[in-house]
Amino acid sequence: MKVLLPISLISIFFSCHLENPKFIRKQIQNKDISIEWYFYSRVTNNSPDFVVVEKDGIKKEIYKATWTILNVTLKDYNIILKVLGPSKNRVPIKHADEAVFGYKILLDTTGTYNEIRLIPDAIKER
């Protein structure tokens, strides 16, 4: 019993320094850029969603929020982020810029709470 307690404590402390698993909700690629919408699995289960655009190895985070993003789409030279409409309880952590890598970022705030069930399931990154 005395041996198990220190071993348990040591394993807890070492596991705290491991990276949180990354879960991908959606990936979009065209000939020019790639877009990734993901979150990290945390014990608190309160990780924000991130939307990151990459071009030629350069990554730019364009949006970060908790339970606000409903969908991410790419149409022509527009990146469309569909989010829940404005609310006192749902505040984005990072707002979208106007453009990234020559693509205009459009924030569609017409999302409703009924659409939360349509958020894609995430797949753990390997």
Image: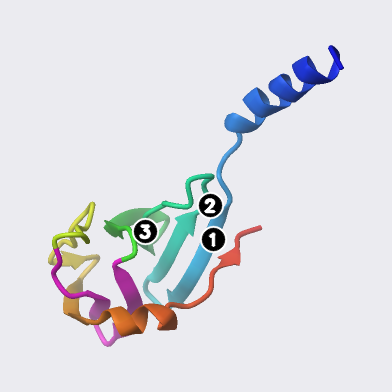
82 falls in the magenta region: yes
Magenta portion: prevailing SS class? strand
- The label on residue 23 is 1
Q: Residue at x 41, y 70 (%)?
A: 34
Give percent across and percent down for residue 28. Answer: 44, 77
Mark 3 highlights which residue?
Answer: 50
Would residue 81 be found to the left or right of residue 56 on screen?
Answer: left
Say which quarter of the image contains residue 61.
bottom left
Residue, far top = 2
User: Which range is magenta?
Assistant: 68-87
Residue 51 versus residue 44 in the image, above or below: below
Q: Where does the N terminus fall, quadrant-wise? A: top right
Q: Which of the two labelled residues, at mark 2 and mark 1, occupies the earlier sequence position?
A: 1
Q: Position of residue 6 (x, y in %)?
A: 76, 15
- Decide which of 106, 124 is in the foreground and name it: 124
Residue 120 percent across, percent down from the top left:
48, 78
Q: Is residue 73 visible?
A: no
Query: Which residue position is annotated with label 2?
Result: 41
Provide residue 91's location: percent of width, then percent of height.
19, 58
In which quarter of the view is residue 115 placed? bottom left
Q: Nearer the viewer, residue 89 or 98?
A: 89
